[in-house]
Image: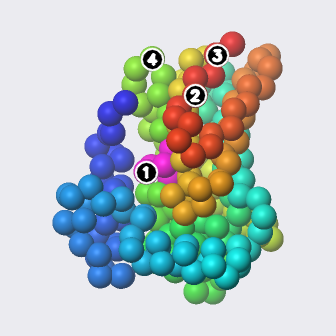
Amino acid sequence: MQVTKQAKAAREYLNAMIAKVVGGSEKQAQLGVPIFVTVRTYFLLLTLMLMAAAPHEFFVSILTIRHHPQEQTLDLTWRITAHDIEYALEDVAELKLNSDHEHPKADSLLNAYFLYHLTLFQEGRQLAWKWVGKELDGETLYCYLQVEGVRSPNELVVSNTILQEVFPEQQNLVHVEGEGLPTKSHTNIRGSGDHTFTW
């Protein structure tokens, strides 16, 4: 599946942020160096493994996709551990979510990260979403997205690699719901590829 102009723009934006914040370069992206997997990240991960300092035992995100036939929309609710996503983006910026010092572009940075790690396809075309908002409940971050112009959730193809570049054991659960349809679920593990939801 081809990367859209929107995803390419997100990648370029984040590469530019790395260049400004941690001294990375646009050339890294041109040479194929993954934007979120820098040398600094590797050293941090190695240090964490050696110190056995993982903040928690399980790494799971839950993405619920609800289809509304009257509005012909997909409403996406993403449930993520807040400090995990902050850790994944710390080479780009300190998000400091839900604090007095929250990064002024936190929403844009999160959305750009999602564009890099989530793809939705249907009938051979990539679906684009709009950012609706976010909220924090304790250690859980909820992010809300919406896709318009979707008549049915059938044959929805989802690829979800969020956080797997920093936590290899990360599991990403995806639930797809539709009016009068049984809920379909799938778990994306590292290297599992995309999944097609059919009824």
Q: CA distance from mark 3 to mark 2?
A: 10 Å
Q: Earlier in the sequence, mark 1 or mark 2?
A: 1
Residue plotted at (36% across, 62% down): 35
Which residue is tagged 4?
A: 123
Q: Which image quadrant for residue 71?
A: top right
Residue plotted at (71% across, 58% down): 59
10 Å neighbourhood of mark 2: few (<14), some, or many (≥20)? some
Q: Does residue 13 show up?
A: no
Q: Nearer the viewer, residue 152 or 92?
A: 92
Which residue is tagged 3?
A: 198
Which one is in front in this view, the residue at disc 3 or the one at disc 4? 3
Q: x, y (%) of residue 17?
A: 34, 72
Q: Amino acid at mark 1?
A: Tyr
Q: CA distance from mark 2 to mark 4?
A: 14 Å
Q: Locate residue 162 relative to residue 82 in the image: left or right.
A: left
Which one is in front in this view, the residue at disc 1 or the one at disc 2? 2
Residue plotted at (48% across, 38% down): 119
Q: Earlier in the sequence, mark 1 or mark 4?
A: 1
Q: Nearer the viewer, residue 130 or 88?
A: 88
Secondary element at image label 1: helix
Magenta-drawn segment:
114-118
Q: Amino acid at mark 2?
A: His
10 Å neighbourhood of mark 1: few (<14), some, or many (≥20)? many
Asked if the residue at tag 2 contacts the one at tag 3, i.e. Cβ–Cβ closer than 8 Å, the answer is: no
10 Å neighbourhood of mark 3: few (<14), some, or many (≥20)? few
Residue 45 belongs to magenta span: no
Q: CA distance from mark 1 to mark 2?
A: 17 Å
Q: x, y (%) of residue 153?
A: 62, 22
Outermost residue toward the top in this view: 199
Which residue is tagged 2?
A: 195
Which residue is tagged 1?
A: 116
